[in-house]
Image: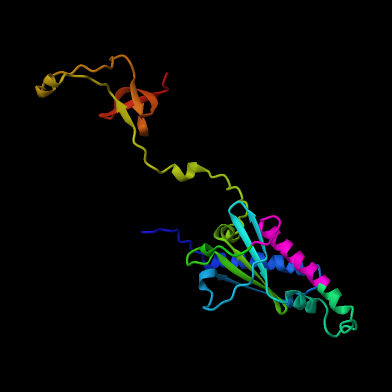
Amino acid sequence: MQVRAFSLVGDSVLAQVQHSLHAALVHGCSQWGIGPELLRTECRRVWELPAGTVLPAWEGRGQSGNCELWLGWQPDAARHVGSALFAPERSFAGTTLAAPIAQGAARNAMADVVMALATVAGVGNIIGGVGALPASLLVRGSGAVLVQLHIGRSSLACLLNHALVRQLGMPATAALAPLPPVQLGPILRDVPVQLSVRVGRAEVGLHNLLHLAAGDLVRLDQPVDLPLRVEGPGSDHWFNAYLGTVDGTLAVELSRPD
């Protein structure tokens, strides 16, 4: 029987990954004047893609340790990004210089978006010519996530392996403020604590133990003229004590241990 890992991706993790990559998309496009109203992000578990979904040709890949990011633009992405950069109503949109200018600016804008994504993902430089996507990333339970970043009518597909999903999906934790000091005295003053007074110990052989009877005397290891030992919880030596009586009841007078 073949066994493989099954990695779960919760909705909160998906939301955090989508938020992180959308922020990178906004940052990369803002440098080229592309407003947030033209930007949209979708995030799905890879194994939940609708049947018949056609994935793009993967053009770039970034890796840092176990984290991997795969990128692929849709066909004619540069033309659509150029349309987002240069609105049709601009006076130069219909000139012969408009197309090459728009294409060049679009490619630069696309490169800035990719750089912003790589920075957020922490995968360093994106390397081109990566070839086919490993089939292991597409199986159910792979933990991989597909994020579609839309710029107007163009889109960039980003596939994140499970290690990168975990890295981006972990919510940022703020430093915890130190707890105020607690006065334990008022809290613990009514907690009962048992004290034991050790009178002494004796060792007897097993034969003598079996023949002990009422009226027998057992010699202890505690001299009569030395204080007794008062023990707290855990048999810790807290005080010395001298045995006496108060109102017909046994009592001890405490003193500091030597």
The spot of residue 215 in percent (x, y) is 11, 21
Quarter assignment of residue 128:
bottom right
Image quadrant for the C terminus?
top left
Picture layout, residue 59 above or below residue 257: below
Is residue 199 visible to the viewer in this orientation of the structure? yes
Image quadrant for the N terminus?
bottom left
Q: Residue at x 89, y 78 (%)?
A: 97
Which segment did they paint magenta? Answer: 104-130
Q: How many discs appear?
A: 0
Q: What secondary structure predominates along the stretch shown in magenta?
A: helix
Q: Is residue 216 left or right of residue 61?
A: left
Quarter assignment of residue 85:
bottom right
The spot of residue 102 in percent (x, y) is 83, 75
Quarter assignment of residue 241:
top left
The spot of residue 212 in percent (x, y) is 11, 22
Magenta highlight on residue 40: no
> In the image shown, does 76 or 163 lie closer to the viewer?
76
Q: Is residue 45 left or right of residue 105?
A: left
Q: Residue at x 60, y 47 (%)?
A: 178
Q: Residue at x 69, y 66 (%)?
A: 23
Q: Is residue 217 left or right of residue 126?
A: left
The spot of residue 92 in percent (x, y) is 90, 81
> In the image shown, does 210 or 224 lie closer to the viewer?
210
> In the image shown, does 196 or 141 lie closer to the viewer?
141
Is residue 143 visible to the viewer in this orientation of the structure? no
